[in-house]
Amino acid sequence: MALGKQPIHTDAAPTPTGPFNQAVRIGNLVFTSGQAGRNRETGGMGDIRDQTRRCIGNIEAILSAAGATLDDVVKVTVFLRSPDDTAAFNEEYRALMPEPLPARSSAYAGLKNPDMLVEMDAVAVLPERE
């Protein structure tokens, strides 16, 4: 594999619906793919709070498979369907993401599925092994 890229996969997060991995590790960095908030059991999406919790939960599961945690996240990218969801998203995000909060970019975007209100990805730095 070029540059020593290592694909990351876990059954604890949704299987990608396209030609990409849940995450890729290179060196001590882990880059997750965008995560949606689909309920794996029902297939439903729920409201912005539900979707935010599931997005972060999926990222957490993928990072765990790579040997990292949410504490190791240094950058998050967020795509919201509607500006109306910003306040509720931020409340859930702040409740779930550990301090110090990572750097973050946010944008409003048309998302793949019409029921999808948020998509998130993250970059984490793996802890040094002793």
Image: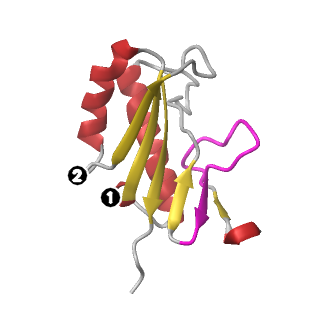
Residue located 45% across and 27% down the image: 107
Q: Is residue 44 shown above or below 23? A: above
Residue 72 in the image: state x and y as whole percent: 37, 60
Residue located 55% across and 31% down the image: 41
Q: Is residue 112 shown above or below 94? A: above
Query: Considering depth in this image, is 93 or 58 the residue closer to the camera?
Result: 93
Instruction: Read off the residue under disc 1.
Output: 71
Q: Amino acid at mark 2?
A: Glu
State the CA–CA distance, disc 2 to disc 1: 8 Å
Q: Are marks 2 and 1 in contact (CB under 8 Å)?
A: no
Residue 119 in the image: state x and y as whole percent: 50, 31
Residue 12 in the image: state x and y as whole percent: 54, 49
Q: Amino acid at mark 1?
A: Asp
Looking at the rendering, which quadrant does residue 115 occupy? top right
Query: Considering depth in this image, is 24 or 92 the residue closer to the camera?
Result: 24
Q: Which residues are magenta?
A: 10-27
Q: Which mark is residue 99?
A: 2
Mark 2 closeness class: few <14, some 14–19, many ≥20 residues within 10 Å: few
Q: Is residue 22 magenta?
A: yes
Q: Classify mark 1: helix, strand or loop.
A: helix
Residue 65 in the image: state x and y as whole percent: 53, 61
